[in-house]
């Protein structure tokens, strides 16, 4: 089962974020879900700079990794 987390961020009207999502924010989201990882374990293939759903890899060990789904929505959204 894929873990799904949602991040609410300030963004422009066109859906572009003021600043890209950083690994520290994902670590904080996972901590709120009871999952403890470090920033160095978060592997993002590209910068997340807009709203939408993105797959983010969490490297758990040298041979084990997991993918989570990160949904970025406007800060004022109820979704």
Image (spheres, grey):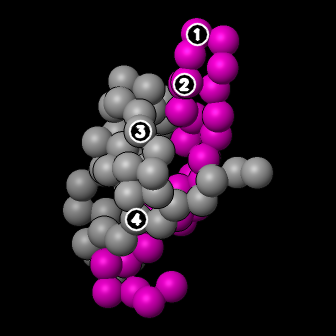
Q: Where residue 76 appears, x then y in whole percent?
A: 32, 86
56 is within the stretch colored magenta: yes
Which residues lie in the magenta part? 50-79
Q: Is residue 65 visible?
A: yes
Secondary structure at numbered mark 3: loop
The answer to the question of whether label 2 and label 4 lie on touching residues, with beta carbons closer than 8 A, is no
Badge number at residue 62: 1
| Dot 4 and dot 1 residues touching (CB under 8 Å) | no
Q: In which quarter of the view is residue 4 placed?
A: bottom right
Between disc 3 and disc 1, the foreground one is 3
Identify the residue under disc 3. 36
Between the residue at mark 2 and the residue at mark 1, the CA separation in whole angstroms equals 7 Å
Where residue 21 sits: x, y (%)? 34, 50
Q: Relative to residue 22, is residue 66 drawn left or right?
A: right
CA gap, disc 3 and disc 4: 17 Å
Q: Is residue 58 magenta?
A: yes
Residue found at the far front of this picture: 34
| Residue at position x 55%, y 42% in the image | 56
Vertical order, 44 against 29 (above or below): above
Q: Which residue is mark 2?
A: 59
Q: CA distance from mark 2 to mark 4?
A: 20 Å
- The residue labelled by disc 4 is 7
């Amino acid at each position: 089962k894929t873990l799904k987390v949602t991040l609410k961020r300030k963004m422009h009207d066109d859906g572009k974020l003021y600043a890209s999502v950083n690994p520290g924010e994902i670590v904080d989201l996972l901590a709120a879900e009871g999952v403890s990882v470090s920033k160095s374990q978060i592997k993002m293939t590209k910068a997340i700079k807009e709203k939408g759903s993105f797959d983010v890899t969490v490297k758990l060990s040298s041979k084990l990794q997991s993918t989570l789904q990160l949904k970025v929505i406007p800060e004022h959204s109820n979704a």
